[in-house]
């Protein structure tokens, strides 16, 4: 019989871990499907036929439907969470959003974040503010999106995470003696 032990996994970056100029290439590219685009477009009530009407879109300069730009934003931000905001207490803003090239069904998106600034807060000693430039690219290396993202990130000394209770896990779930 083998002894088991809970070992620490990735806990995310804390405020102290960020340095201006660092670039994080986020893991996991994601291929955008037609279903993603149609569902997101309908969910958000985006009625531009460019996203859901193939006959209409085929007559435009792009010749096919475009993926909803707000989906591309949400996807890129989601990709960055593991490196940038796993320990965020709030997102303060998304600024200077730019769509550089269209995204089509079947494109695979990759994202990276560069730390452009960080600062302490006088009003909150348990967090600091980190601003990153988030950039997303398609499978051909074409930049399709950039934006600045600013979360408040928890400082390590105020974090209450452990191998037994990583971020998001309730107490006493999993790896119990009766398992």
Image (tube, rainbow, N blue to C red):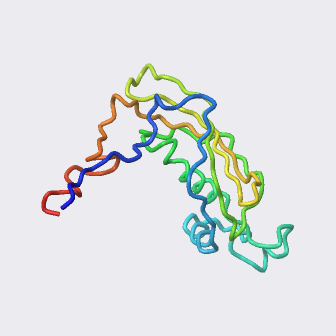
Q: Residue furthest left?
A: 178
Q: Identify the residue at image location x=71%, y=58%.
A: 138
Relative horizontal placement of residue 124, taking residue 18 as reference (left or right): left
Residue 179 image point, x, y percent: 17, 63
Q: Quadrant of the image for the N terminus?
A: bottom left
Image height check: is 39 above or below 124? Answer: below
Most foreground residue, 48 or 176: 176
Residue 45 position by quadrant: bottom right
Q: Nearer the viewer, residue 9 or 156?
A: 9
Q: Would residue 13 appear left or right of 134 to someone viewing this image?
A: left
* Residue drawn where x is 74% and y is 71% of the image: 65
Identify the residue shown where x is 27% and y is 50%: 6
Relative height, residue 146 to residue 22 (above, below): below
Q: Residue furthest top?
A: 122
Picture coordinates of residue 36, whole percent (x, y): 59, 69
Which quadrant of the view contains residue 159?
A: top left
Whole-percent x, y for residue 133 in the image:
64, 39
Q: Is residue 144 left or right of residue 1?
A: right
* Residue in front for this viewpoint, 77 or 68: 77
Above or below — where is 172 with respect to 14?
Answer: below
On the image, the x and y values in percent for residue 97 come to 68, 45
The image shows residue 118, relative to residue 30, as above or below, that is above
Q: Who's the residue at 67% across and 51% down the image?
A: 136
The image quarter in which residue 48 lies: bottom right
So how many labels did they put on this image? 0
In the rendered image, the residue lying farthest to the front is: 1
Q: Is residue 28 left or right of residue 170?
A: right
């Amino acid at each position: 019989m083998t002894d088991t032990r809970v070992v620490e996994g990735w806990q995310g970056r804390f405020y102290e871990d960020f340095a201006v100029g660092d670039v994080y290439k986020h893991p996991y590219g994601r291929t955008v499907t037609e279903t993603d685009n149609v569902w997101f477009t309908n969910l958000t009530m985006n009625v531009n036929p460019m996203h859901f009407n193939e006959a209409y879109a085929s007559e435009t300069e792009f010749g096919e439907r475009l993926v909803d730009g707000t989906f591309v934003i949400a996807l890129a931000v989601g990709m960055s969470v593991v490196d940038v905001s796993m320990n965020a207490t709030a997102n303060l803003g998304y600024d200077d959003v730019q769509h550089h090239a269209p995204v089509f069904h079947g494109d695979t998106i990759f994202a990276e974040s560069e730390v452009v600034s960080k600062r302490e807060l006088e009003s909150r000693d348990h967090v600091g503010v980190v601003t990153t430039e988030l950039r997303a690219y398609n499978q051909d290396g074409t930049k399709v999106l950039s934006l600045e993202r600013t979360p408040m990130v928890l400082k390590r000394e105020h974090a209450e995470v452990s191998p037994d209770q990583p971020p998001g896990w309730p107490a006493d779930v999993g790896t119990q003696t009766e398992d």
